[in-house]
Amino acid sequence: MRVNGVDHPVPHDARRLLADHLRHDLKLTGTHVGCEHGVCGCCTVLLDGAPVRSCLMLAVQAEGHDVTTIEGLARDGKPLHPVQQAFHDAHGLQCGFCTPGFVMSVVGLLAQHPEPTAEEIDEGIAGNLCRCTGYASIRRAVRLAAELSR
Amino acid sequence: MKPPPFEYHAPATVDEVCALLGSLEDAKVLAGGQSLIPLLNFRLARPAHLVDINRVDGADRIYERDGGVAVQALARQAAVEDSELVARVCPLVVDALRLVAHRVIRNRGTVCGSIAHADPASELPAVLLALGGHVVARSTRGERTIPAAELFAGVFETALAQDELLVEAWFPASGKPSAILEESRRHGDFALAGVVRAGDRLALFGVAPTPVLADPRDPGRGLKPSGDLEATPDFRIHLVRALSEKAFAA
């Protein structure tokens, strides 16, 4: 499988979840793991460009596919991805635990709806839980990200 | 490792899938995995074998058949939600999918997987029942059609045999007045109770071990829903009556 542009072999043990493979084997600890059953959204990554839960996939299932983690959005000192920049500028994070999952979900949301309505924003982030912000600043960050992405 | 040990199989054709299901003891089909993998992570399910169908080519078609829409085993919920064909022929399915978890889950989850999983509170089985659709099951013994009314046997139980793969779900056109309404504590959660209207037909979900057809004039009759921390049986019956009235007022 290809992770952030680099080819990697899949793990031998089929039981290895994609989230655990990214974190423990590839040391890409930017993908966070919260509930481990698909509810919190922290572990969201892009699979062939579309956001998916990496805790609800076996790593072997990513064979032949393209995985992008939060580390892959802005590599090697390059400027932040517009969604990352927007979360920074609009204070769309506090403790930061949920942030990688939100950012990956929002990348997917803006790919589907480049100019999202308020309803589409709420729908797009409803699958990610944040215990700090109260979501108001995250909504603002999504609107700003849409502007920055134009 | 979160999931319990299992032997992993990744066949490339439907015939290979059927051969594996026919020869292995205690095998589960892995499609989108959005229900099965949480069950594995919690170790509530411990199948000896997982037959992953994600590498099967050409099993993700969405096409028009017999005046309705056929959705194959690997068609993702998001693809069905975005399908112009489904929006035109069976918009009720699109309305229902928007209530299924969240878009990120629907990117991976499959329509056929939801139906085969047969969660009593899930939307798609009730839609299939309300519309009078069917599924096509295949095994090495052959292929058969199972009408929705005969498919759902109990909580997480269907009439599918151990060696059968649900290869296709068929939804009749939902041209007549149709609606799906549900009540849940949070957006994307499983419903406390829900109703599907397809013309004059009414199906309920979340209030019995399977989705059930009900009389629109008295939708709560004979229901014995279970109670839990989120809703008492009486509250669920109240929801069914209120949501049915709303669905038929339109």
Image (tube, helix red, strand yellow):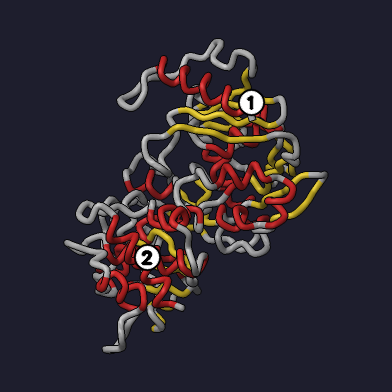
Amino acid tagged 1:
Phe
Q: Residue at the location (34% across, 54% down)?
A: A128
- Asked whether A126 or A145 is in front, the reply is A145
Asked if one can make out residue B182 in the rendered structure from this viewpoint, the answer is: yes
Q: Helix, strand, or loop for circle 2? A: helix
Q: Which residue is mark 2?
A: A142
Give the CA distance from mark 2 to mark 1.
37 Å
Q: Chain of mark 1?
A: B
User: Residue B194 vs residue B247: left or right?
Assistant: left
The residue labelled by disc 1 is B248
The amino acid type, in three-letter code, at marker 2 is Val
Secondary structure, mark 1, is helix
* Position of residue A41 measured from the top left corner of the image (x, y, whole percent): 34, 56
Q: Quadrant of the C terminus of chain B?
A: top right
Q: Is residue B186 left or right of residue B199?
A: left
Dot label at residue B232: none
